[in-house]
Image (spheres, rainbow, N blue to C red):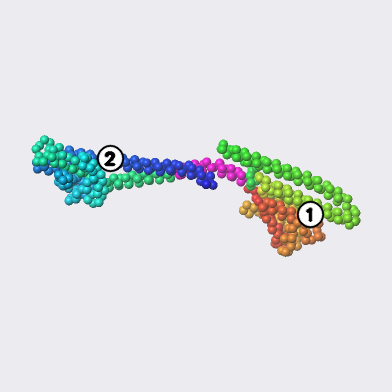
Amino acid sequence: MLRSLRARLLVFSAGPSLIFLVVGVVVAASLVRSVQREDFEDTLHQELYQLVAWAQVDDQGVFDPKLPGATRYEITFSGWYYQVFQVAEEGTLEVVASSPSLQQARLNLPDVGTDRNRWAGRSVGPTGEPLLVVVQRIPAEALADGRPIPNPDDQFLLAVARSELPLTQLNARVYRALGVGAAVVALLLTIASVVLVAVSLKPLARVQRALHNIRSGEATRLDGNFPQEIEPLADEINLLIGENEKVVERARTQVGNLAHALKTPLSVLTNEARGKDTSLARAVAEQAALMRSQVDRYLARARVAATSQVLGTRTEVEPVIARLARALIKINSDKGITLDVDVPTGLAMRGEQQDLEEVIGNVLENAFKWAKSRIKLKVEKVESDLVFTVSDDGPGLAPEDRPQALKRGQRLDETTPGTGLGLSIVTDIVSAYGGELELGAAAAGGLEVKISLPSAR
């Protein structure tokens, strides 16, 4: 079974037409051959009538037909022949006259019963060519025209032959002409079928482009004028996108409700333990803080899992980076750190704004913790991805410590504040979008974080 719709349409549109064309050509060739054969035989019969009309028996009883102006019987082996046979009493045939074109050759007559006066059949000519032979039985008295002749009871056979080579050659030319014509028509039919299929499938290509635009964030709905047969498909796709958005919105609401439901008891536990210098209070405060960080992390993962696959989401990069840069510079103004931002205009990420803020915000916040004087943020488009590169001039990370920094809750330096979940959350979000996160050494000596996320057109 053909899986390609294009191939099916081509087979079922051009296939029957080509079959009918072949059948038509075969039938036409057969009809032409039949007509040419009938015309060929009729011509030979007419030739026999003329020879009989001009034939006479002389006073010695000799029968030699002479057709005025018939030079075709004069040319040696011309393909036109006649020969006269006299029937003896014992049934043998004696040649009494021949056309000059036969030279000394003798015609081989087709077999026939003795009760027939005219018959036709095929034979072989003097040069081996196929012949059509017509034979007429003629009594001698029928040729006397009332004149006395020596043997009025004699019987003659007049055989007229014509080579079938011209007919074969004519048939070959007709077949070639029909074949060339059929090939041209078949080519035109195939081209017409290809064009028809291309035009018929063009709306499906529009649907494909529209879906690509939705997936890449350029559109949120399947819009456009589609044929009547495809319009229900477009409507169902739009309904599916709408249902997907509703499911994501419900997931966001549930995540938010869960966050509020968990954070309130954790805040109560933290407040109860605050200000009490006991081992229990310290343990409660420590575990409550750990639980809060874990809740934040897993709620973030749940939100990312719900939103990263939403169709049609698109986030402009430059405004988000500008807001994050202003906020972090203001928060860390006492550190005297310079943030260099290089973001080309017009770049957009295929995803949620909140996720982009979470990723870049965590990376920049980590860079501000460790940088000495300068942080660089560069964004560039590489093929179908956006590559974010954040580098600082801090102490950096040794190659053997970089994998550990991406693990959940791992802190390589307990002297700095934080839960150690920043880069692990970033890893979760980037992974959910099918991107990559790499840690390396910056040119200024610190840490370089390179993140790739899908780009929206």
Residue with the mark numbered 2: 39
Q: Is residue 449 left or right of residue 148?
A: right
Depth check, front residue: 366 or 242: 242
Prevalent SS, magenta region: helix
Check disc 1 and give the amino acid type. Answer: Asn
Circle 1 Cα neighbour tier, 10 Å, few/some/many (<14 / 14–19 / ≥20): some
Check disc 2 and give the amino acid type. Answer: Asp
Residue 147 coordinates in the image, percent (x, y): 10, 37
Residue extending farthest front: 90
Was residue 190 drawn as part of the magenta stretch in this picture?
yes
In the picture, the disc for residue 332 is 1
Circle 2 Cα neighbour tier, 10 Å, few/some/many (<14 / 14–19 / ≥20): few
Depth check, front residue: 313 or 116: 116
Residue extending farthest top: 146
SS for callout 2: helix
Residue plotted at (20% across, 44% down): 159
Q: What's the magenta region?
A: 188-213
Residue plotted at (77% across, 57% down): 409
In the picture, the disc for residue 363 is none
Residue 378 coordinates in the image, percent (x, y): 68, 55
Image quarter of residue 371: bottom right
* Disc nearer the start of the sequence (1/2): 2
Image quarter of residue 246: top right
